Amino acid sequence: MRKRNAKQESQQPEEKTNQKSFTKRGEPAEIKTCEAGQSKSGRGWLRRIKRLFLTLFVVYISVPFLIRLFPALLANVVYLSALKAPFFVDLQRPEDLQLNHTANFYLSPEEGVRIGVWHTVPDSRWQEAQGEGLSWYESALRDQAPIIIYLHGNGGTRAIGHRVELIKVLSAAGFHVLALDYRGFADSTGDPSEEGMTADGVYLYRWVKERSSGSPVCFWGHSLGTGVATNAACRLQDQGSPPDAVILEAPYTNIREEGAHHPFAQIYRIFPAFEYFFLDTMALSNIFFPNDENLKSMSSPLMILHAEDDHVVPFEMSRKLYEIALKSQHSQENVKLVSFDGSLGYRHNNIYKDPKLPALLWEFLQPVAEF
């Protein structure tokens, strides 16, 4: 027993020793493995970040060259007609947007082109309009209420929120509103172009004028649509039938200057040959929209509306246009500039929120309506 116990006793320290050495050998091994894993993981994230920045840099460098090689790419950015927002809205059912006195219809300015139009009658006639067809809406244009043809900006459809809200404000103020989607936009067919969009505006004006029996008809252009409005006004004037009035909301001087100031352009302002790659390329796509040149010859009464905090089109462009129009028309009565203080927060799309807007419009259009 003593021998066995002695033997066991002699083995116990060895077991302890072995156990301790295992622990000592094991712990550092585990720590080294963890540190190695963390090091590999860190290097992996660093490589991913480097690849991401390299990819972004390659894209940044490539875009100007692609745009110059394929000018149609820039045209798609200018028009944004591929953006069909708001999605899942049936444009043939304006009543779904609380436009309960609105008819949807289509016109064909030329073969192969169909443009979608909403006609909203004044709020005072909404009960009469219930259940009526297109013929009733056409005849309603003869009620002597002023008629506004709304030419929206780039991207989206006539159902975008701020456009619908403006239609409601104008209808409540007692105006007919005809809002169209240019060719290539929304449910309209064809391909967008400055020439084609201008032709759409001219065609709708003539269509309305033929049915209005003397009611005043004016253009209201917003943002990109201001260029369509002045183009169409000058063309109609050259043909001997200038529009009764033109209202420009957030207008730019010309598309080249606006392109240089647009938020998207700020990403590339420091890029070498910025004008060559971007501004000159718009001209290659026949995109000019020269509001400044148009106002030098346009004779229709003009009202300019612009928020001082507009983040897309600088307010100073409206001031320039106002000075040009004053010099060309030699009359402060026919040319008005209405600015909206930046503290109101209207920015680029929300002038419709101003409670004074209906009164301003009637003050401007009253002489035209009486004439």
Image (cartoon, helix red, strand yellow):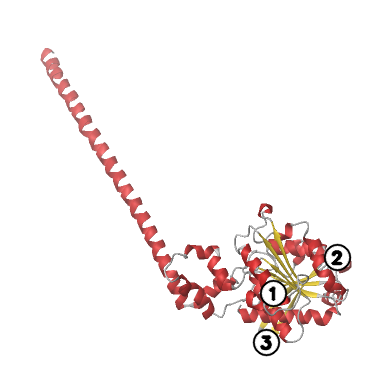
Task: Tell me what residue is drawn at x 76 percent, y 86 percent.
Answer: 240
Please indicate, yes or no, whether residue 54 appears anywhere in the rendered image.
Answer: yes
Near mark 2 (Cα within 10 A), the count class, few <14, some 14-19 or many ≥20, is some
Is 364 placed above or below 288 here?
Answer: above
Tally of numbered discs: 3
Residue in front for this viewpoint, 24 or 44: 44
According to the image, label 1 marks what residue?
A: 327
Label 1: state its secondary structure: helix
Q: Quadrant of residue 301?
A: bottom right
Residue in front for this viewpoint, 34 or 340: 340
Residue 81, percent across and down?
60, 72
> Residue pushed farthest top?
2
Q: Answer left or right for 352 relative to 255.
A: right
Whichever of callouts 2 and 1 sits on the residue coming sooner in the sequence is 2
Q: Nearer the viewer, mark 2 or mark 1?
A: 1
The amino acid marked with disc number 3 is Glu
Residue in front for this viewpoint, 72 or 286: 286
Q: Quadrant of residue 353?
A: bottom right
Residue 271, percent across and down?
43, 67
Near mark 1 (Cα within 10 A), the count class, few <14, some 14-19 or many ≥20, is few
According to the image, label 2 marks what residue?
A: 126
The amino acid marked with disc number 2 is Trp
Label 3: state its secondary structure: loop
Task: Tell me what residue is drawn at x 17 percent, y 25 percent.
Answer: 17
Whichever of callouts 2 and 3 sits on the residue coming sooner in the sequence is 3
Q: CA distance from mark 2 to mark 3?
A: 34 Å
Task: Tell me what residue is drawn at x 67 percent, y 57 percent.
Answer: 346
According to the image, label 3 marks what residue?
A: 111
Residue 163, percent across and down?
70, 64
Whichever of callouts 1 and 3 sits on the residue coming sooner in the sequence is 3
